[in-house]
Amino acid sequence: MAAAPPKIKVSFGGNDRLQKLKEAFRGKYGQTPLFFARAPGRVNLIGEHIDYCGYAVLPMAIEQNILAAVSVSDLSSIQLANTDPKYKDFTVSVDGISIDRDNPQWHYYFLCGVRGIGEHLSLSPLAGMRCVVDGTIPASSGLSSSSALVCCAGLVTMEANQTSLSKVTLAETCAKCERYIGTEGGGMDQSISFLAEEGTAKLIEFNPLRATDVKLPDGAVFVIANCCVEMNKAASSHFNMRVVECRIATKMLAKARGLDWSGLLKLGDLQKELRLSLEQMLELVEEVLHPEPYSRDEICRSLGISAQQLREDVLSANTQHATDFKLYQRARHVYGEAARVLQFKAVCDSSPVTAVAQLGDLMNQSHASCRDLYECSCSELDQLVDICLQAGAVGSRLTGAGWGGCTVSMVPGERIDSFLQTVRERYYAPDARRSALEEQSLFVTRPGGGAAIFIEE
Ligand code: ADP
Ligand code: NG1
């Protein structure tokens, strides 16, 4: 069987965070945790908003993670608490789990993971559990705090029920079950959370899910900077709107090429079906789609479907209100970005002397495409990217879903100190709120390891 996440025996003596969480657990439930589970967040180096179109992405895990202390209980309930008081306690019976997508509170993300693994393994009844969760990933900032929470909950459920699953199965199951919260993500976050390995970024490919090491060039450092604007995906429709625009673009392009379009959902599947290169797909977009936004009427007329079919078969629950669809721009971004991921990987593999400059260039193109074609940036992210480039980065781009959150910049090692200093002075220092958040908002990051279980030695 493919490898399950590691189970690591650790002495808590040298680990402050585990020790503190153990004490918090004791304080809360009056007992000692049985085990701990940890799932990392991630930074995506390139390949934005293309995983749900079926295309490969290139993330690495970060050091920040979600950690849970857990014990198994015979109360037939799941009791959840959090070290951050803004996330309130929650208890639910093991057979009464429901997820309210209109009200995406923290415990629903956790329950996505519990329910997903429970269903995958047909666990009935689920073991009762007591958990205390402790997170260090800035929330709603494009570093995948939500997926780390779902993955941590999935891993906790597997372990508490004395079962074992491979990392790939856990990743696929957690990608599916995070959709219970309402966002139609593609699986990048859950995949890297389980499949990450220390010291290497990964090319993540889908269907079938696989991860290949990508060695980043020596001499370049990756820096995350948070623009300090939060955007919760599940509480807004921006994210699903892009998923829907890509879905409609797929159908319109397929229809124009005479394919049976009704079952086609992803721009990547369309490319496979047509057996064309990414460049040819870009030509097809130019030929078939127009830059002016499409109305609901025009889409219905072109596809020969009724307004009701559009609502029921194509739009998602939180995009029912949408009136304009920018199909041309979204499809151009997706095919262009998919090509950039492959180029990025090829540069890393062949490591020419100009690697750092070439990778920086691809990152800059990616940001421009996210900003201008996919419209998932915001003025603060654009300002921060500009400052990072002025401060000495060779490439800088938004990372994750966007509309706020973090940038990732590639900085030559010898420039790192002056880079950090300039970004501090120009982006954080002039604004009191940003300045207060600076410590957790601007940091160097290295490829971290994947999800694991810890047991006290
Ligand atoms: P991200 O881009 O970080 O995944 P989302 O907006 O999708 O952002 O999800 C953020 C949500 O995840 C938060 O609103 C919260 O419900 C949950 N979350 C993140 N971090 C924690 C944490 N440490 N403890 C509990 N819930 C968390
Ligand atoms: P974040 O940055 O975690 O909101 C989201 C999606 C990814 C991917 C990126 C954009 C989820 C859980 N995550 O990530 O699958 O589509 O946006 O590249 O929906």
Image (cartoon, rainbow, N blue to C red):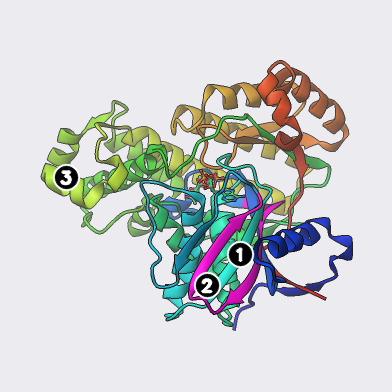
The residue positioned 57% from the left and 56% from the top of the image is 149
Please name the amino acid that badge 3 sits on. Leu
Position of residue 309 relative to residue 407, above or below, is below
Is 218 situated above or below 96? above
SS of the residue under disc 2: helix
Q: CA distance from mark 3 to mark 1?
A: 49 Å
SS at badge 1: strand
On the rendered image, what quadrant is the N terminus found in? bottom right
| Residue hosting label 3 | 303
Mark sitting on residue 169: 2
Q: Which residues are magenta?
A: 59-83
* Helix, strand or loop status at disc 3: helix
User: Which dot, 3 or 1, sits closer to the camera?
Assistant: 1
Q: Residues within 10 Å of mark 2 (few under 14, many from 20)?
A: some
Which sits earlier in the primary sequence, circle 3 or circle 1? Answer: 1
Question: Exactly how many numbered labels are in the figure?
Answer: 3
